[in-house]
Amino acid sequence: MKNTALTLLTGLALATAAQAGSDYSSKGKEVIPPPAPSCLWTWFAGGSGGYVSGDWDEEIYTLHLGAERKCPGSDCSHAFYLEVGYTEKDGEIGIATAPGGPASLVYDVEVEIIPITLNYKYECALTGNLNWYVGAGAGIALYDADASHVQAPGQSFDDTLFYAHVFTGLVYNVSESFEIFGGVRYIFMDDPDLDIGAFGFASGEDEFSMDGDLHFELGARFNF
């Protein structure tokens, strides 16, 4: 009987000591929560080929380089990037040889336009690997024109014009590092200050500006 009582008392004492040690350990240990995930900036580069529909009515190509900010738990991102484009056009401009007269001299004109803009893009998930985006950009357009005529001296014109656009489109994420996109832009551009002949243009001047035209594009982008 004594042995049984002694065994019970010993077991009870050991259980009490173990419980006390467990409580002390759990209360005495400081739990440090993991740091919250932070937003990340990533670099990207890409380009596009497209078509300007309107008075300009020519192909256009672009290259861009920038950075995109993504935050954990968000389906949207913000991007800033520098973009350079190139487009060219050949055409004719009719010149009046008397004030208010009809076009009597027709100049052959070659024009190159290089838009350089800083752009902002806001992009959000749509469904699956498909995203939508909107954005805007502003900068300058380097405008270069050469005019020639068999009966008159050739002339060259260089100008730096204000250039801007707003855009929207869709992005398909092929992988984490590669995506393709397609969209449309509306172009704002100052008119070039061309001066051919003593009496100015008689016809064809509007064909050598992209102001108010639509730029349709298809491109690809690599994320680093």
Image: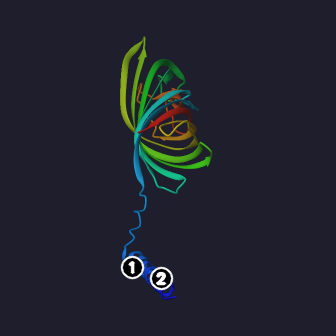
What SS does tag 2 mark?
A: helix
Under mark 1, the amino acid is Tyr
Q: Nearer the viewer, mark 1 or mark 2?
A: 2
* Residue occupied by mark 2: 7
Spatial separation of the CA atoms under disc 1 and disc 2? 26 Å
User: Which residue shows up at 44% across the image and 84% down it?
Assistant: 13
Question: Could you tell me residue 95's position as x and y percent?
Answer: 48, 23
- Quadrant location of residue 66? top left
- The residue at which mark 1 appears reads as 24
* Residue occupying the point 55% across, 33% down: 217
Seen at 49% across and 18% down, the residue is 106
Foreground: 86 or 89? 86
Q: Secondary structure at mark 1?
A: helix
Q: Position of residue 143 (x, y in %)?
A: 40, 31
The amino acid type, in three-letter code, at marker 2 is: Thr
Are the two marked residues, 1 and 2, in contact with CB atoms closer than 8 angstroms?
no
Closest to the observer, 150 or 214: 214
x, y percent for residue 212: 55, 39
How far across and down, in percent of the image, does residue 90 sit?
49, 20
Residue located 55% across and 46% down the image? 133
Q: Residues within 10 Å of mark 2 (few under 14, many from 20)?
A: few
173 shown above or below 196: below
- Is 43 drawn above or below residue 59 in the view shown? below
Residue 181 is tagged as none
Residue 109's image quarter? top left
Instruction: Please report whichever mark, 1 or 2, sits nearer to the chain's N-terminal start.
Output: 2
- Front position in the image: 16 or 135: 16
Is 78 on the left-hand or right-hand side of 55? left
Image quadrant occupied by the C terminus: top left
